[in-house]
Amino acid sequence: MKLKFLGSGTSQGVPVIACHCEVCTSLNPKDRRFRSSALVTTDSGKKILIDCGPDFRMQMLENREEQIDAVLLTHEHNDHVIGLDDMRPLIFRNKKNIEIYCMKRVGDEIKSRFPYAFADVKYPGAPSFDLHEIQNRSFEILGTDISPIEVLHHRLPIFGYKIKDLAYITDASFITNEEKEKLKNLDFLIVNCIRKEDIHPAHFILPQVIDLFEELKPKKMYLTHISHHMGLHDDTEMELPDNMFLAYDGLEIDF
Ligand SMILES: [Zn+2]
Ligand SMILES: [Zn+2]
Ligand SMILES: [Zn+2]
């Protein structure tokens, strides 16, 4: 299987509008980060999108991706869901609703954010979604087993996902010991890290993910949901422990 980072940036993206810091003005493509999202390609060639934020359209175009078979949502914040309307070209071409998997609260939010996608009589050109409610236990999408990991995003319980020996966790600020059991000794642990210092109420910062790395002992850890306060990609990566890396847009992991 393959996971490709379509975006590795925090909610405002990098560069930030009107910011002139060294990261936001960097010419290194790795310092340009779309909002966080990942595309999993299964062994049978199915494409599962994890989160669908405001950059979804450009992420598809720039990566020359042309198919999404299912969408897996971590939570309802706009930087993870607001691109769903841009699924329309795929819905019209395939003559098929988009299948969305998420917890009940997130599904309710999707219905209130996109009521026209659920209308009995749809406005011409409206998207159409099928919601699949998931619980914190393993489930299957198109023959691929997926295990949710419940994490806290400030006080909001949200889901990360484990597929084979890879886990993708974004927007976490706390993980219980029980859920950590699912994350021990993985080949790949992807986790959010917004900046190097200054505790954030809703997101891990670097010293916290270094503690997680030492505790959970993944073979490799990749950081995502990164803000411009993290510093330049190439400089920051040199400061990280061995086998810990910053994700960047377009990075692929085989697992
Ligand atoms: Zn986010
Ligand atoms: Zn900046
Ligand atoms: Zn969030």
Image: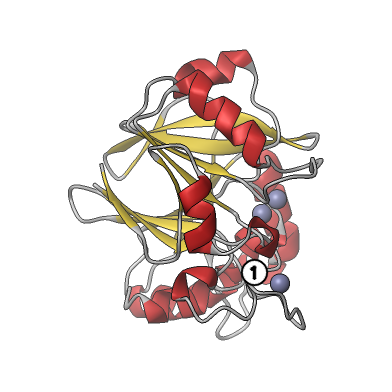
Q: In this figure, which colouring scheme has been used for the structure?
A: secondary structure
Residue that appears at 43% across and 81% down: 89
Residue 50 appears in the picture as rendered:
yes
| Residue at disc 1, secondary structure | loop
Q: Quadrant of the image for the C terminus?
A: top left
Q: Which residue is mark 1?
A: 13
Q: Which of 126 and 165 lies nearest the eye of the viewer? A: 165
Residue that appears at 77% across and 83% down: 18
**Residue 122 place in picture, x, y as percent:** 61, 76
Res 197 quadrant in image:
top right
**Residue 88 place in picture, x, y as percent:** 49, 77
**Residue 123 place in picture, x, y as percent:** 63, 82
Give ligand 2's quarter of the image.
bottom right
**Number of on-image labels:** 1
- Residue 51 vertical placement versus 133 (above, below): below
Residue that appears at 57% across and 86% down: 124
- Residue 8 vertical placement versus 238 (above, below): below
Residue 100 appears in the picture as rendered:
no
**Residue 201 place in picture, x, y as percent:** 82, 40
